[in-house]
Image (cartoon, helix red, strand yellow):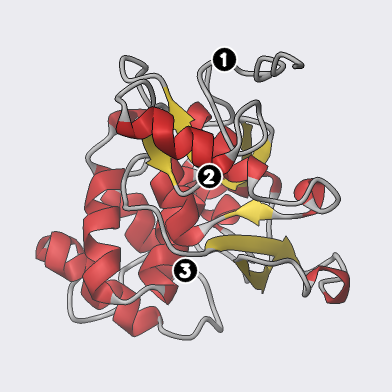
Amino acid sequence: MATPSPPPHPDLYSPGCPFTWPELQTLAADGVLAQFHQHGYTLPDVRVSAQLRARAAANAVPASVRQRVVAGRMTAAWIYGCAEEPDKLALLVDAKRRISSLRNTRGCTLHEVRLGPFDVVSMGGLMVSSPLRTAVDIALHVDAGRALPALAGLLARPEQDVRLRLLVLAIEATPRVPHKRSALEKLALLAPSLVPGSPVDVKHAINAPDSAQDVAEVLRVTHLESEP
């Protein structure tokens, strides 16, 4: 009987690497492994980090499309440890790429967006939207019941480099975006003093930004580019 090959990352176990799905469930029931992802397990004493969650999410994305998509919205919030794992992966596809060839990707929801170089970080073999871009997208596109806890989590972690004032500016300064008023109302629930009834006064004008990158450059904010 052949001995199963060890997993490429000894702190991550997923179906077929090296155990089958029933074997993983049995090991978890016996307390040998702990489940932290729909199809991801680790040892009980291992701290589940953003890197580990990103590797687990990467395993759920077909290798053929992994370099063409970016984990975003609530999936990125989960990777950063600020939300529960969503039922489906939220994957962003840059508008410059052809999305038609990706539509048959199972177990995920695709969103065609504009992405700048400061909007994406790489971790665990997967591209993930930056904390700031994640917060902007959640404020704009996710219902308040799920958005508010995730936004509070992102804002509460200094290592994510997300500031509420910057987030308000990023949303207010982005033109032609649906749900902007709704997004600002969500942020007003987190800190009313930063979201007055009138539009936020942007001190430095920003011409038609396509991403949070433009606001970051004007405000000279350094973003998280990778996680050690």
Across and down, in percent, residue 215 comes to 51, 54
Which residue does the numbered mark 3 point to in the structure image? Answer: 173
Above or below, comparing residue 52 to residue 186 in the picture = above
If you read the primary sequence from the N terminus, does the residue marked by circle 3 or circle 2 appear first?
A: 2
- Residue 177, x across and y down, in percent: 52, 81
User: Mark 1: few, some, or many residues within 10 Å (few <14, many ≥20)?
Assistant: few
Amino acid type, mark 3: Ala
Q: Secondary structure at mark 1?
A: loop
Q: Quadrant of the N terminus?
A: top right
Foreground: disc 1 or disc 2: 1
Against 199, is 190 above or below?
A: above
| Mark positioned earlier in the residue sequence (3 or 1) | 1
Residue density around tag 3, few if under 14, some if 14–19, many if 20 or more, within 10 Å:
many
206 or 94: nearer the viewer: 94
Q: Residue at x 22, y 51 (%)?
A: 152
Q: Is residue 34 visible?
A: no
- Which mark identifies residue 62? none
- The part of the image, by quadrant, that contains residue 179 is bottom left
Q: Which mark is on residue 10? A: 1
Q: Residues within 10 Å of mark 2 (few under 14, many from 20)?
A: many
Q: Residue at x 86, y 50 (%)?
A: 64
Rendered image quadrant of residue 186: bottom left
Residue 196 x/y as whole percent: 18, 73
Label 2 residue SS: loop
| Residue underneath mark 2 | 130
Identify the amino acid type marked 1.
Pro
As shown in the figure, which amino acid type bears the numbered disc 2?
Ser
Number of disc labels: 3
Q: Quadrant of residue 93?
A: bottom right
Figure check: 112 above or below 131: below
